[in-house]
Image (tube, rainbow, N blue to C red):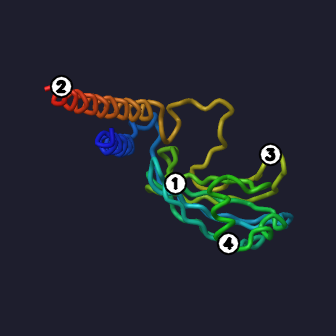
Amino acid sequence: MKKLIPALVAALLLANAAAADVPPPPPPKGKKYVSVTNEVVLGKDVTGYVFVQQVSSGFGAPQFAHEKLELTAGQAKAVDAGGRRSFVSLFAVPQDVAKGFKTDAELFEALKANKVKGAHRLNFASTATVSNQVKGKSVKWTHTVAAIDAKTGVKVKVEGEGYEEPKTNPKKEGSAVPFKGVAAGLAVTAGVLLGGFWLAGRARRKVQSCAAG
């Protein structure tokens, strides 16, 4: 049984890599994909929070990096750039809660495990689907944190070239990661996993045959 574990681990790693490399389908007519750089601005009425940027990299078992951001009302602060295999978020942690952690490292570990009471999260897109009328291959969006509500979380206003307010029921083809791409990735993952299980079963049958002989 121990000999089968490496084969299964390898199959899982191959599945993750294959799914990650599935390219998105062409954008809808009249649209194009662009990369997005983001900056955040603190509203003048937002106080009493510690802000932590989280960058997760990789699929399956991502690696996390955290950094406190000093946000000042009215002054834009750039956040890290995301990508196909990295995702950027901003946590708003109540100051009283943050003070309960002895070190920043303890706070970061708790955020990674989603165990910080009262923390609210804001995610940033690294790519977007915009109109063909937008020039260039990249845009910059400014996220203004207008308020932080204990129940509904961070209330933010986004401004920038090509930005459109999300629809109540957005169409699947309007997503930067369309359903077809996800389905293809899942199909590849399933195929690799089934292949791994078949190889594992074959190896086990061979061992049993040798033992019987």
Residue 187 picture location, percent across and down: 37, 29
Q: Residues within 10 Å of mark 1 (few under 14, many from 20)?
A: many
If you read the primary sequence from the N terminus, does the residue marked by circle 1 or circle 4 appear first?
4
Residue 37 picture location, percent across and down: 54, 61
For the N terminus, the image quarter is top left
Q: Which residue is mark 2?
A: 212
Q: Which mark is residue 126?
A: 1
Residue drawn 67% across and 54% down?
Answer: 122
Q: Nearer the viewer, mark 3 or mark 4?
A: 4
Mark-to-mark CA distance, 3 and 4: 26 Å
Q: Amino acid at mark 1?
A: Ser
Residue drawn 53% across and 55% down?
Answer: 87
Q: Which mark is residue 147?
A: none
Q: Which residue is mark 3?
A: 152
Q: Nearer the viewer, residue 203 or 190?
A: 203
Mark-to-mark CA distance, 1 and 4: 26 Å
Q: Amino acid at mark 4?
A: Asp
Mark-to-mark CA distance, 2 and 1: 57 Å
Q: Nearer the viewer, mark 4 or mark 2?
A: 2
If you read the primary sequence from the N terminus, does the residue marked by circle 4 or circle 2 appear first?
4
Residue 55 vs residue 121: left or right? left
